[in-house]
Image: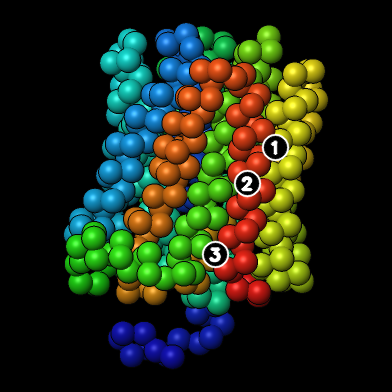
Amino acid sequence: MSDPAGRLIRPQDEAAATGRQSWRLGQFYAVSILARSLLIAVIPAIALLRLGDAGLVSAVYFASSCLTFTISLALPRVLHRLGLRGILAAGTLSGVLCGLSFLLPGLAGLVPGLTLHVLMVLCFENASNLAALRLIARRDQPAFEARRVMLAAPAYMLGPVIGTALQEAGLVGLVFAAAALCACLAPLLVFMAGRGAAAVRPAPAAPAASGFALRGFLSAPRLRAAWLLAVGRAMWWQMLFVYTPLMALSLGEGLAQAGIVVSLASALLLSAPLWARLTRRMGLRRFMIAAYILCGLFACLAGVLAQYSFPLFAAAILLSALGVSAIDSVANTPFLRAVRPRDAARMVPIYNTFREVAQIVPAGVYALLLLFAEIRHIFILTGLSLAAFAWFCRFLPRRG
């Protein structure tokens, strides 16, 4: 094999370059996750303090997610023009403006701040998948996904603890400053990847209308299955990050206790390489069916035990987190294996709407549920839904 200048590239050199790119992209993902996780338990607590009602918090999340979902559907029209560089810049700008928005009191700061936070997540998720499709060979994508999740685990684990501890110490401004700094640093790791200069150029694919892209996505069974399963796992994390702090407060516990539970649940993502080995042994389909059922049943149990004590609730939610760590070890592999690289600029934004859908639909349902039920019933309902998601795993290939 040779490069565009005609120089011979030895296989071992190509493998080393791919390894460097894989680690750099994994580090980018971890830093972008830290920008998110520092605030992920802080923002719901701020919302509850400002609004005074858990149902209103769900309503605000619902409205914010609807707006970002609309933006996601518009991305296929502009992503080929923005390129990876533009989407990274948009993520950084959103992360910085998020912190500034929360300086405003009441809803005037809460709604735009939450929307900018979700928009930052959206931009960095799109950038991560686009970079992976351009820089990581298909045969290396399952290993890359497990590595990416493993590197993100410390960020998921430490972010909520640091964020809630600083908030309880009265240093909430420092939390937003740290998150903004991470949002600024994350794109640098993409540019430092082995072929970063090529990665940040706009995609060569011809532009396409979002309607055409959506029809193409919906007509592909493997893409549909990948999206639905991604909705399921994102829904679990949304439940954990938003409603675990609310559950702790409703049971008379402090935010620090909720932050510890969220961090311990996130720490289980460190097991991703071990789950990857079991996936190869069991096959992708059987592994994902078992993981979704395990995750869902223990989430239901957490909701039942919450009526007795927070420690019992925490133990059950951590067992549920064990199931979701298995699901996340596969992460975006079903999508990355199903999409063609030349379609990436059109399909990646549509696939990434799973995050907004996992916020919009549950937030709307939870807001209605909280009109006549307790917070713990959210965990029961989510657990039943996750167990039902195991049915969609039958559309996955038997082998990873």
Horizontal arrangement in the rendering, residue 322 relative to residue 129 (left or right): right
Mark pair 2, 1: CA separation: 9 Å
Alpha-carbon span between mark 1 and mark 3: 24 Å
Residue at the (51%, 9%) spot, across then down: 170
Q: Residues within 10 Å of mark 3 (few under 14, many from 20)?
A: some
Q: Quadrant of the N terminus?
A: bottom left
Q: Is residue 155 left or right of residue 92?
A: right
- Provide the residue designation for mark 1: 299
Dot placed on the residue nearer the N-terminal end, 1 or 3: 1
Q: Circles 2 and 1: CB distance less than 8 Å?
A: yes
The number of discs equals: 3
Tag of residue 333: 3
The quarter holding residue 59 reads: top left
In the rendered image, is residue 202 in sight? no
Residue type highlighted by circle 2: Leu
Q: Is residue 125 above or below residue 114?
A: below
| Tag 3 secondary structure | helix
Circle 2 residue: 386
From the viewer's perspective, is the residue at label 3 or at label 2 nearer? 2
Question: Against 71, is 289 above or below?
Answer: below
The amino acid type of the residue labelled 3 equals Thr
